[in-house]
Amino acid sequence: MAVLAVVAATVAFWSGNKEAPSLVDTAKKTKKLTIGVLPDQPGLGQRVGEKTYAGLDVDVATYIAKQLGVPAAGITFVPVTGADRAVALANGKAQLVIAASPVQEEKRGGVALSDPYLTMHDDVMVLSTNKKMRQSRDVVGKKLCVLPGSVIPAGLKAKAMPTKSISECLLALLRGKVVGAFGKDAVLAGYAQQNPGRFKLLGPNGTATSYSIYLPAKDPRVKHKVDSVLQKMVQDGTWKRMVTTRLPMLSTSQAAVHP
């Protein structure tokens, strides 16, 4: 029995040693972290230089990294898309992915989801000079371009013009082919910031979608840590300041996003 106990302890010892260290420990030790973000989503994640990114997702990433012991200079941002953000984490291209990932997405191998850090609502954006459009019900019977991935709810009773890109949708709006653009409020607000004062949101309607951070699936410690950091970010007022800076159109409207 004594021999068996020694063998069992030895196996347990070596099995434990084979487990990969938590990102909580490696980040604190190396002072470095690689984070996947969107490169082409104004207000959320956008490349503004060869290696520089800006947006709400980037601010959240920087805050989390600091809480993990990694300074801003130790962060390496890598571009990801909606199609490959999970793959980027699973194959090691990124250690965390903060790229507006819907919590409804099916969990894939090597990926876990944090608690939500952002909630977007369906909304309609129109030209600020359009005085006839003041609330969502004003678009009944009107033609709206629809951002990719969005669907106009039947209750809105508007005519849909599908588009292949956000740019195509906004161009249709600017040229008067439609009276408004339909999609997620944070996305619309981000693009509106590129043309200050030219657009306005009519207010949330339809579906609200929550977004999370992609984390290593086999690292429960980092999920616990990130979730606690997100809670702190909201409680100390940092999250609200980030939204006010990156998406001011939302911070002053009834469509304000929240975790």
Image: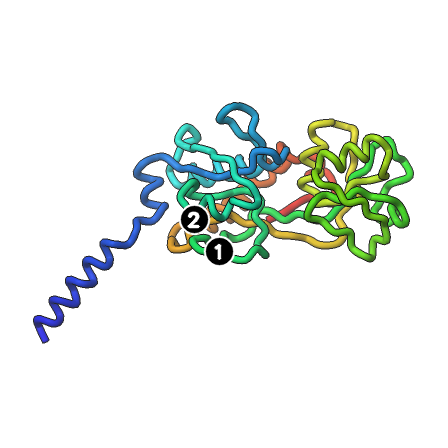
Measured Cα–Cα span from mark 2 to mark 1: 9 Å
In the depicted view, which residue is nearer to us: 246 or 33? 33
- Residue depicted at x 66% and y 35%: 247
Give the image location of residue 249, x and y in percent.
71, 36
Q: Residue furthest top?
A: 49
Q: Using residue 198 as the reference point, say whether residue 9 is left or right of it.
A: left
> Which image quarter is the N terminus in?
bottom left
Residue 176 numbered mark, or none = none
- Three-letter amino acid code at the position of disc 1: Arg
In the depicted view, which residue is nearer to us: 130 or 224? 130
Q: Quickly name the residue at label 2.
A: 90
Q: Within the image, what quadrant is residue 45 found in?
A: top right
Does residue 73 appear in the picture of this structure?
Answer: yes
- For mark 2, give the secondary structure: helix
Q: Residue furthest front?
A: 164
Q: Earlier in the sequence, mark 2 or mark 1?
A: 2
- Residue depicted at x 74% and y 27%: 196
- Three-letter amino acid code at the position of disc 2: Ala
In the depicted view, which residue is nearer to us: 111 or 71? 111
Q: Within the image, what quadrant is residue 32 found in?
A: top left
- Please say if the residues under marks 2 and 1 sit with CB atoms less than 8 Å apart: yes
How are the colours assigned in the image? rainbow
- Residue depicted at x 50% and y 53%: 113
- For mark 1, give the secondary structure: loop
Q: Quickly name the residue at label 1.
A: 108
* On screen, residue 40 above or below 225: above
Give the image location of residue 144, x and y in percent.
82, 43
Give the image location of residue 160, x and y in percent.
82, 47
Does residue 224 appear in the picture of this structure?
Answer: no
* On screen, residue 4 above or below 99: below
